[in-house]
Image (cartoon, helix red, strand yellow):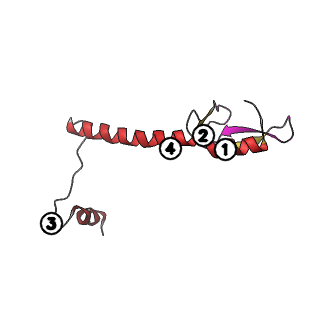
Amino acid sequence: MESLNDEMARKTVKRYACSNCWGDLKIIPDITKQEMYFVICETCLDETKGYVTKYFVNRRRGVSEFEKRDVTRLLQKLSLLPSPVRTPLKDGETRVMANLRELGF
């Protein structure tokens, strides 16, 4: 991996994430060159393979959340996962009020 100057290293940490784990990046000084820095993943460390934009990471995480919901509902319909148990509504009670009651309010 190449070392970067201070300005490029800061912009990279601000705008990008690790392409391997989508983790945050950090700046490490290059001991062979003055005022040069390496940008590596906080989790992967020296195994940092590259960068992806934080916009991509956030967009992909949002899509993945909806995919997870769809799969969960499908598995519940097929009886492979238990369906959520809902408390029956009392007279004049709304679903929001029932949810709050289930939470102990």
Say which of marks 4 and 3 sits in front.
4
**N-term mark: 4 or 2:** 2
Query: In which quarter of the view is residue 27 placed?
Result: top right
Quarter containing the N terminus: top right
Magenta residues, as a range?
Answer: 32-48
Q: CA distance from mark 3 to mark 2?
A: 49 Å
Q: Tags 3 and 2 in contact by the CB under 8 Å rule?
A: no
* Crowd rating for badge 3 (residues with CA inside 10 Å; few <14, some 14–19, many 20+): few
Q: Which residue is mark 4?
A: 58
The label nearer to you, 3 versus 2, is: 2
Looking at the image, is mark 3 or mark 2 earlier in the sequence? 2
Amino acid type indicated by mark 3: Lys
Residue in the image at 57% along x and 33% along y: 20
Q: Is residue 44 magenta?
A: yes
Say what amino acid the circle numbered 2 marks. Answer: Ala
- Badge 2: residue crowd in 10 Å (few <14, some 14–19, many ≥20): many
Callout 1, which amino acid? Val
Q: CA distance from mark 1 to mark 3?
A: 53 Å
Q: Residues within 10 Å of mark 1 (few under 14, many from 20)?
A: many
Amino acid, disc 4? Asn
User: Measured from the top left, where is residue 94 in percent x and y?
Assistant: 20, 64
- Left of 32 or right of it: where is 47? left
Query: Residue at coordinates 85% horizontally, 34% vertically from top-left?
Result: 32
Whether 10 is among the magenta residues is no
x and y, in percent, of residue 90 in the image: 15, 66
Query: Residue 13, labelled with which disc?
Result: 1
Q: Indicate which label's residue lies in the foreground, 1 or 3.
A: 1
Residue 57 lies left or right of residue 74; in this view the side is right
Name the residue located 24 percent from the left edge and 49 percent from the top edge: 84
Q: Which mark is residue 90?
A: 3
